[in-house]
C-alpha cells in the first residue's frame, strides 16, 4: 500500500524526512539554507522542526520503532 494512504507509513516518511533534513543541515548547512522558499523550502522547514523539537522528534522515532517491532 502507498505511504499516502496508510497513516502509519505516512508518519514514518515524515519522521524520516525531518531526521534526514536535520542531519544534512548539520553536515552541510549551505545546502539546505539556500532554499528557504518554494518546494525546496519544505526541506528547510523540516530541518528547522528537527532542530527545535529534537526531543519530541526523537521520542516519536522511538515510539514508531517500537510500533513497527510489535507488528
Image (cartoon, helix red, strand yellow):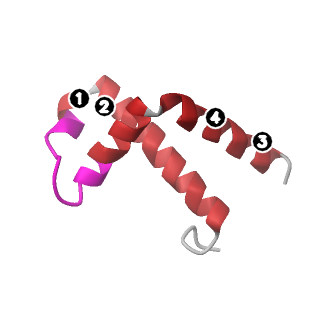
Label 4, secondary structure: give it. helix
Q: Which mark is residue 25?
A: 2
Could you tell me residue 51's position as x and y percent? 39, 30
Name the quadrant of the N terminus. bottom right
| Residue 36 falls inside the magenta stretch | yes
* Image depth: mark 1 or mark 4 in front: 4
- Which one is earlier in the sequence, the residue at label 2 or at label 3? 2
The crowd level at tag 2 (other Cα within 10 Å; few <14, some 14-19, many 20+) is many
For label 3, the crowd category at 10 Å Cα-Cα, with few meaning under 14, some 14 to 19 and many 20 or more, is: few
Q: Which residue in the structure is indicated by mark 3?
A: 66
Q: Nearer the viewer, mark 2 or mark 4?
A: 4
Q: Earlier in the sequence, mark 3 or mark 4?
A: 4
Q: Secondary structure at mark 2?
A: helix
Disc nearest the viewer among 3 and 4: 4
Outermost residue on the top side: it is: 27
Instruction: Name the residue carrying label 1.
Output: 29
Residue 59, labelled with which disc?
Answer: 4
Discs 1, 2 touching: Cβ within 8 Å: yes
Asked if the residue at tag 3 contacts the one at tag 1, i.e. Cβ–Cβ closer than 8 Å, the answer is: no
> Distance from label 1 to label 2 (Cα)?
4 Å
Amino acid at each position: 500500500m502507498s505511504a499516502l494512504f496508510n497513516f502509519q507509513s505516512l508518519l514514518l516518511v515524515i519522521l524520516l524526512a525531518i531526521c534526514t533534513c536535520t542531519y544534512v543541515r548539520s553536515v552541510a548547512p549551505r545546502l539546505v539554507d539556500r532554499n528557504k522558499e518554494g518546494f525546496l523550502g519544505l526541506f528547510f522547514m523540516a530541518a528547522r522542526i528537527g532542530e527545535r523539537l529534537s526531543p519530541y522528534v526523537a521520542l516519536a522515532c522511538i515510539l514508531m520503532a517500537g510500533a513497527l517491532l510489535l507488528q
